[in-house]
Image: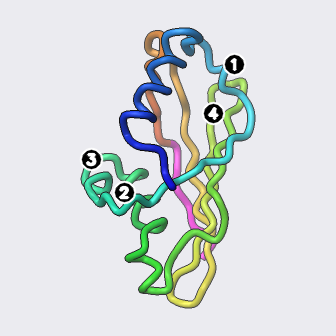
Amino acid sequence: RFPSRPAIAALEKSWQQEYGVSSILQLQGTWKLQLIDDGDISRWTTGDPSRAFLGFFNSGFSNLLGMGLTAAPTVEIFADSRARSVTPLQWAGGLDTITYDCGLMVLQRNRLRQVPYGLRSQA
């Protein structure tokens, strides 16, 4: 069972009020992303290509096509404000790993900007 959207929103709001991100150093480390597939494909059309990509590959629809994530994506955030995400995939009977490099900037408390550096595939 997945948490409801209101429960997620309440949790995010309570975290932001108490701790707030004001430095990239607070986010430094390796993070494992947890994705949910609640059947809501509206996430795919938010204008966020990363969210649409991960949403599709995590969906039941992609499984019907023999496509999907082979492990949870990870994001590594470095002290110098660089970030790298690694997403292992399978598609069309093959395996691939997508690596996305970017920079992060704190614009104000709890607001970050991402600057893309590059996207590459091992396939």
Pick whichever of labels 3 and 4 is earlier in the sequence. 3
Q: Amino acid at mark 3?
A: Gly
Question: If you read the primary sequence from the N terminus, does the residue marked by circle 3 or circle 2 appear first?
Answer: 3
Nearer-the-camera pick, 27 or 1: 1
Pointers 3 and 4 in contact (C-beta within 8 Å)? no
User: Marks 2 and 4, Cα distance to the nearest angstrom?
Assistant: 22 Å
User: Magenta part of the protein: which range?
Assistant: 117-123
Q: Residue at x 67, y 34 (%)?
A: 77
Q: Residue furthest front?
A: 1
- Disc on the earlier residue, 1 or 3: 1
Mark 1 surroundings: few (<14), some (14-19) or many (≥20) residues within 10 A: few
Label 4: few (<14), some (14–19) or many (≥20) C-alpha neighbours in 10 Å: some
Task: Give the label on residue 47, or none.
Answer: 3
| Image mark for residue 82 | 4
Badge 1 is on which residue?
25
Q: Is residue 93 above or below residue 102?
A: below
Q: Mark 1 and mark 4 in contact (Cβ < 8 Å)?
A: no
Residue, x 43% and y 51% (percent of image)?
50
Kind of element beneath mark 1: helix
Label 2: which residue?
A: 52
Residue 117 location, x and y as percent? 52, 43
